[in-house]
Each structure stands twice: as structure tokens, then as C-alpha cells.
Image (cartoon, rainbow, N blue to C red):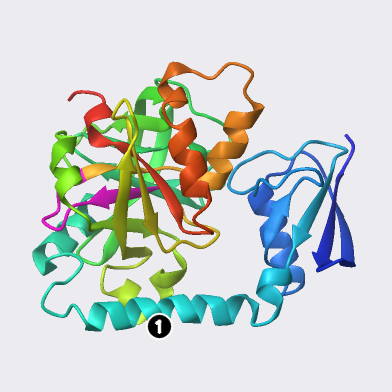
């Protein structure tokens, strides 16, 4: 199968050309280039498109792509990330009397969180239990979408130690972006908030993510190994009330995550970054009804450079 060619650009000048075997995801290409050179971080796109590619998007065999690093070259990725972390730290210090999550809620989040394992038993992304036996995760963390009835492996933290848990897939919706699962044994869980009207009056909520860059910092460690929380701000609800479009600090590698109100209620599930979803929508010849109401909101969110987010609202989760 033909390979994928990626040219790294700094301004108008090509600085490197790399060929990758197919099939390959945009995330794998981005990570490989970053491993080659820490400065090779930027916008990955097709030559005639301004759409940023990321996540589990499969690149076309034989096609050519570009990685523009100009916006990162003056300071580098590390400086950019540290700048974001410093800003987040200052924001948190200014809100000492109003923590992101109450301490008892942070503990409940830890206990109700499971880390979904991939085919090679590496950490794929985050799932959350919203009932004592039922949970949900985002579909894009899987390289191959699981089928209903398929068994998944996950690990959960108990008293600082991780334990293996078997999950059975009960529902899959590519249109709404979720995979639901069930366990045989009761698990800790977080309550749902299915009434979206509260979001219209709340401008701050929390985005808890696995494999977030901040997880290795002092801020991230407050919420347990591999789990970090950052503030998010609502922007708008989609017309049919399926999704919330919001702003939050994000970096490449954000995984499936849960959106929480301050008191620990689940308000939704974080989906792929806005620009990636826009790219997927543009490729569809027929837009499904469940996604159609996102188009305008996504285009608006995508203009928030690197900080847009999309979350499926909990009211769309399958009934327990």
C-alpha cells in the first residue's frame, strides 16, 4: 500500500520530508514527527485544506500532507505548554477559595473513572461510570470501533492501586460519538445531570481528562495518576440540545474525558477537538441528523485557535 508523505514547513520553507507506511492515523504521524524533532509540532493538514487533522483520523494512502510549525517555532512546544500551565496555575491560585472540584468530589471522580485499554493493553482513554454497573466513553479512542457484545479491558484505581475490570459493550453510536459498557460487579459512579437548562446559567465547569499534558504537573497530580482537571467555559448549546460547544485549554493527545459541574455531577462526555470534527463533517456526503445541528457551532468553535471543545450532553446518554 502506498505511503503517506508529510512535508514539514517553517514559513515558506520546507525543512523536512518524511514518508510513513499506511494505514496510519494523524495522531501517530504527529507523535512520530515530534519524536524526531521537538520543534516539529504544529498544524497538520492536506496541502489544499486549512483543516487541522488530529486524533484517530486515518490519512489517505499515497496522499501528501503538510505540517506547519511557524506558529510554534519562536518559542517551541515546551515553552507553549509551560505558558499554558503557568496561566492555569495563576488562575487556580486566584481561586483558592473556589477549587475546580471539591476535595470529596475529586476523590469520587478518581473512583468512578476507568482507563480503557487498547488492543495492545496500553492506555487508550478515559471512561466514566454513571450508574453502578454502566459507563460511557468516546468512540474515537478506539482504532477499530467495538461491536455490541464485545469485551473490553479496563483498569480502575482503588486505594492507590489499579485493578483490572472487564467491560461488555452495550451500545455504540458513531453519530453521537459514544460507546457504552456494563460490568458484572457494582462500581463507584457519579450522578448524571440530564437537565441542560442549568448550563445556560453556569459559565464555569470542569473538564477531566486522561493523558492530558498537565497530568504530570503538581496540578494534575492532585487528581490522581493519569487524571487531570482544567476549567472549561460554556460557549453555547447546539440547536437540538445534543452537544455543548465550549472553550478549554487543550493540547494534542487529549483523550476521552468527562465534563463535570463543580459538585461532581456529569454533564456530558468530551468528544474530539472541534477542528477534527469539522474535517470529518466536510468529508461526509450525507450529514446525519444527529450531527447536522453541530455544523454552525463547530465552525464557530474551530475559530478558537486550539482551544475549542465539543461535549455530548448527558441527556443523550442511554437510559439506565
Residue 173 drawn above or below residue 58: above
Res 138 quadrant in image: top left
In percent of width and height, residue 130 lies at 20, 39
265 inside magenta stretch: yes
Decide if residue 193 is in sight here: no
In the displayed structure image, the side of residue 44 where residue 130 appears, left or right: left
In percent of width and height, residue 8 lies at 82, 63
Residue 304 drawn above or below residue 78: above
Label 1 crowding class (10 Å Cα cut-off): few <14, some 14-19, many 20+?
few
Q: Residue at x 32, y 43 (%)?
A: 236
Q: Residue at x 58, y 47 (%)?
A: 55
Q: Which residues are magenta?
A: 256-266
Choose between 33 and 176: the one closer to the eye: 176
Choose between 176 and 146: the one closer to the eye: 176
Choose between 15 and 211: the one closer to the eye: 15
Decide if residue 228 is in sight here: yes
Q: Residue at x 29, y 68 (%)?
A: 224
Q: Quadrant of the C terminus?
A: top left
Q: Quadrant of the N terminus?
A: top right
Residue 105 drawn above or below residue 179: below
In percent of width and height, residue 211 lies at 45, 61
22 inside magenta stretch: no
Provide the secondary structure element on which disc 1 rests.
helix
Q: How many marks?
A: 1
In the displayed structure image, the side of residue 192 where residue 67 appears, left or right: right
Instruction: Write down the residue under mark 1.
Output: 86
In the displayed structure image, the side of residue 296 where residue 166 appears, left or right: left
In the displayed structure image, the side of residue 155 where residue 42 appears, left or right: right
Q: Residue at x 60, y 42 (%)?
A: 56
In percent of width and height, residue 67 lies at 76, 58
Amino acid at each position: 500500500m502506498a505511503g503517506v508523505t508529510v512535508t514539514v514547513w517553517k514559513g515558506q520553507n520546507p525543512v523536512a520530508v518524511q514518508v510513513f507506511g499506511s494505514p496510519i492515523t494523524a495522531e501517530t504521524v504527529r507523535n512520530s514527527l515530534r519524536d524526531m524533532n521537538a520543534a516539529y509540532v504544529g498544524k497538520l493538514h492536506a496541502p489544499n485544506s486549512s483543516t487541522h487533522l488530529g486524533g484517530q483520523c486515518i490519512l489517505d494512502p499515497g496522499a501528501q500532507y503538510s505540517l506547519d510549525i511557524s506558529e510554534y517555532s519562536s518559542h517551541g512546544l515546551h515553552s507553549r505548554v509551560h505558558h499554558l500551565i503557568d496561566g492555569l496555575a495563576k488562575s487556580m491560585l486566584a481561586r483558592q477559595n473556589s477549587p475546580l472540584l471539591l476535595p470529596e468530589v475529586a476523590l469520587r471522580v478518581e473512583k468512578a473513572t476507568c482507563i480503557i485499554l487498547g488492543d495492545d493493553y496500553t492506555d487508550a482513554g478515559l471512561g466514566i461510570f454513571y450508574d453502578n454497573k454502566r459507563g460511557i466513553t468516546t468512540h474515537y479512542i478506539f482504532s477499530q470501533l467495538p461491536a455490541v457484545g464485545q469485551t473490553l479491558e479496563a483498569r480502575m484505581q482503588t486505594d492507590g492501586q489499579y485493578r483490572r475490570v472487564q467491560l461488555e459493550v452495550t451500545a455504540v453510536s458513531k453519530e453521537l460519538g459514544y460507546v457504552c459498557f456494563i460490568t458484572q460487579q457494582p462500581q463507584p459512579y457519579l450522578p448524571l445531570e440530564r437537565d441542560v437548562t442549568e448550563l445556560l446559567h453556569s459559565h464555569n465547569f470542569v473538564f477531566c481528562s486522561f493523558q492530558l499534558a498537565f497530568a504530570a504537573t503538581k496540578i494534575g497530580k492532585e487528581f490522581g495518576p493519569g487524571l487531570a482537571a482544567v476549567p472549561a467555559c460554556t460557549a453555547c448549546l447546539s440547536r437540538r440540545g445534543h452537544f455543548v460547544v465550549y472553550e478549554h485549554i487543550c493540547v494534542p493527545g487529549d483523550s476521552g474525558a468527562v465534563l463535570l459541574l463543580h459538585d461532581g455531577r456529569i454533564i456530558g462526555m468530551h468528544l474530539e477537538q472541534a477542528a477534527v470534527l469539522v474535517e470529518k463533517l466536510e468529508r461526509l456526503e450525507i450529514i446525519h441528523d444527529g450531527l447536522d445541528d453541530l455544523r454552525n457551532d463547530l465552525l464557530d468553535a474551530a475559530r478558537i485557535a486550539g482551544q475549542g471543545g465539543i461535549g455530548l450532553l448527558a441527556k443523550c446518554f442511554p437510559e439506565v
